[in-house]
Image (spheres, rainbow, N blue to C red):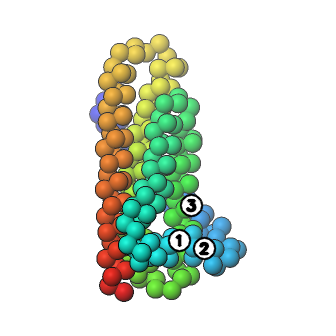
Amino acid sequence: MNAEQKGVRAMNIDIALAAATAAGVTGGVILSLGADEKTLISLSGSEAKLSLAAAGDWFGIFSHSAAGAGLILLAAFLLGFCAVAQPFEILLASFRGLGLGVCVRGIYLGEGIFRSMALFLPFATASTGILLLGIKEAFRLSMRYLSISATSENRIGLRREIKDYVFKFIVMAALISAFAALDAFIALLLCRLT
């Protein structure tokens, strides 16, 4: 396979993941139309984040942010080892979008929209980008396993690919942790300013 075909294939998965995430956001907003407003506001997490920031609980904010994105990253990591997990990996991107859609609707229903968006958007955007990179890597490894399972392809080099895969996910987990720490810092800063 030449480099041009690989580039087209990589672009196709990028488009599919972006479309799945956008569809998830739209679905989250639509599903939340009939939900209770107080529930949606609490699901957005901005009030809880501000109350933790008012108490000076930096670690509480950090762990809450890191855990949510970290669980999705872990799911993507594990799905990468399955030869037929590609539909589930696309659904994982939709699931992330669904959560974002519900949260955005809750933010718009609450008070202090600009403050809530400042609390929500930086980490949501950064972590979603990292998660989509992780899902893309999982998709690639799943496709590799599928090609090995469906053909008599040589398995030499798979060990190195898995080492690279694990290393990439360690870096992505570290980035999510760094962004969660920054998210906690922003929440504490906004709490002091308001």
Residue most toward the right?
34
Which residue is tagged 1?
A: 44
Rendered location of residue 12, percent (x, y): 43, 45
Marks 1,3: beta carbons within 8 A: no
Q: Which mark is residue 40?
A: 2
> Which residue sits at x=34%, y=41%?
170
> Disc 3 marks which amino acid?
Leu
Question: In this picture, is 87 found above or below 121?
Answer: above
CB atoms of marks 2 and 1 within 8 Å: yes
Q: CA distance from mark 1 to mark 3?
A: 12 Å
For the residues carrying marks 1 and 3, which lies nearer the camera in this image? 1
Mark 1 burial class by Cα count in 10 Å: few <14, some 14-19, many 20+: many
Tag 2: residue type? Leu
> Residue at point 34% right, 79% down?
190
Classify mark 2: residues with Cα within 10 Å, few (<14), some (14-19) or many (20+). many
- Image coordinates of residue 182 in percent, x first then y, are 31, 64
Picture residue at 33% right of the left edge, 82% below the top: 192
Left or right, 26 with reference to 113: right
Q: Which mark is residue 99?
A: none
Rendered residue at 56%/31% (across/down): 84
Query: 166 or 125: which is nearer to us?
Result: 166
Q: Which mark is residue 98?
A: 3
Q: Earlier in the sequence, mark 2 or mark 3?
A: 2
Q: Quadrant of the N terminus?
A: top left
Which amino acid lies under the numbered mark 1 shown in the image of this protein? Ser
Q: In the figure, is residue 181 to the left or right of 71?
A: left
Relative to residue 1, is residue 107 depicted above or below? Answer: below
Give x and y (percent) for residue 135.
44, 44
